[in-house]
Amino acid sequence: MMKPHSFHIPVMGIGFTLDTPLKVSHYGIDSVISLVDDILIERLRKMYCEKYEMEYNEITESTPDYRAKRITAYLNLIKILAEKKFEELKNGSISSDEIRRYISMLPDASRIKKEFNHTMLNGNFNKWIKENLSIGSIDVNIMTKVDRENYIGEERLSFEYNDAHAALRGYANSDLNSSLVLSAGINPSLYSYITHFDDFYPDRDNNIKKKIVLKVSDYRSALIQGKFLAKKGLWISEFRIESGLNCGGHAFATDGFLLGPILAEFRDKRKELVELLHEIFIKALSDINRIIPEKVLPVRVSAQGGVGTAREHQFLIDHYKIDSVGWGTPFLLVPEATSVDKITLNQLAEAKEDDLYLSNISPLGIPFNTLRGNTKDIERLYFISKGRPGSSCPKEYVSSNNKEFTEKGICTASRQYQFLKLQELDKEELTAEEHKIKFEKVVEKSCICVGLGTSTLLVNNLDTKIEGVGVSICPGPNLAYFPKIMSLKEITDHIYGRLSVITRTDRPHMFIKELQVYIAYLGNKIEETKLSMSDKHNKYYLTFVNNLKEGINYYKKLFAEMGETFEEKRSGILIELDDNMKRLDNLLMEISNHSKRIAV
């Protein structure tokens, strides 16, 4: 059965989409759950068991393999509850509000929508509903590099008890028939561990119960990771392309490669990619005596990051042959779909461009899109003012990321690390200005592994005694153009062009916005190294600029050719492209001047 919608809701933060499938899957909408925080997952399981009067048996930290078991139990619960809501919807009468709501949110070109009225008058309504309506997929996300080692006392446990490995096992042992979204790059140990579970392999009917989705930023990454998995007999059912910088949460910048050219490469090489991976996949299945599919398995390609209008949505589908478009950031303003507390929700609705920025607050050392003045930032600054910077680190999910001071590893956002780092800093012979700069770099790290889940506790009136009430939030730059809190019906109508919730007329096209963000990112990098620019920096910056220039030339040709699609905006887009080319020329001069000055 074809998917009813041409969009999906990507994973957002740790808690914002943790129960989204329970809110939207009965309307046929796909969404993604984060598997980072098993403590939060267990608390939500308890809450929903009590709400729906279901038996709850606590899985404590004394339970062997508790992390994986908590995840399995929660996913099975969400599956049961979501399917129950869907069955109730399907069993509704011909005048059911829920059925009408399901149908009304579908794209106008949907076959199901077109057949609905005819079936009401002439057909077997209940039979038609059961045969044509489908539930949204309950997918899960594992950020591959968030793979903390775990211990019992001082004894380090074997690799399969690492956080990402345990999360994978939790999903693999669940009853879900859905997809595992792998993000943040390749983790060879984790990818190899997938081979331990039968659900990731095709059955005799050519079906894969648990599909693999790779979130990638370019074609090269897709090819490398796809071949790695295919050699193990694992099929990639979807490549999910995300803008390097024009996205929410952690931002994995490319070397200046822009989304449009990347999508074009996927479109043009899609058949070649699938054939190559299929050949490797079949050989690997034969080598390990697994069932070999009778035909090439399907591969979907989706895209996300910065899309904001119905025209952009449909353009990605029509021009780049995208199967699904991810709408993330705007859904943070939809309480019917995501869990965002009232204070943060109002901050998001009022946010402008300057309130949204690419920060260095993530202890993972990866640029992180966030909202200026979020309540976690306020909490962080309060502790700094009291002379106690850093977090108590109650959950330690990224505690393995630094072993500078300890053998076990501690998080750079933790109070322990920042205390030790500042002690070390005080021993250096620095000017007041140098000390200030280095001090701020140490204390800017924020406890996002707690902050990105706290909102879920606040929305559900759960105790925040351990975590505190500070909320980290991770919208992309696109949020600035969405001015209000929306209903689920409003956002779907916006996606499909039945209404527009964007009232501003100055929103740049998503490709232009990404270009602007990349140029700003490059400018900041050049500024950071202007006093110490090496040949390596110089070479990197020149490659970055050249890739951006190639992207601009691609867009000039694209928008010139797509006259009818962008008629009223085309002249403005072309002017923007020329202006950004001039900005790049200015950056080239800066690079040259800094290099000459250092050489002298």
Image: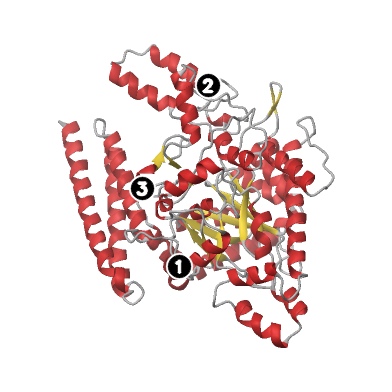
Could you tell me residue 433's position as x and y percent?
Answer: 28, 20
Residue 471 visible? The answer is yes
Query: Which one is in front, 195 or 101?
Result: 101
Three-letter amino acid code of the residue under disc 2 = Arg
Query: Which one is in front, 520 or 592?
Result: 520
Q: CA distance from mark 2 to mark 1?
A: 46 Å
Q: Give the residue at mark 2.
A: 415
Q: Give the residue at mark 1.
A: 310
Three-letter amino acid code of the residue under disc 3 = Glu
Three-letter amino acid code of the residue under disc 1 = Ala
78 left or right of 484 in image: right
Could you tell me residue 312's position as x and y percent?
Answer: 42, 66
Figure quadrant of the N terminus: bottom right
Taking the spot 57% from the left edge, 36% from the top edge, the residue there is 449
188 left or right of 433 in image: right
Sequence order check, earlier mark of 3 and 2: 3
Q: Give the residue at mark 3.
A: 353
Taking the spot 49% from the left edge, 55% from the top edge, the residue there is 330
Which SS class for mark 1?
helix
Q: CA distance from mark 1 to mark 3?
A: 21 Å
Query: Which one is in front, 285 or 540?
Result: 540
Residue neighbourhood size for the residue with mark 3, other residues' Cα within 10 Å, grouped as few (<14), some (14–19), many (≥20): few
Could you tell me residue 328's position as x and y percent?
Answer: 51, 54
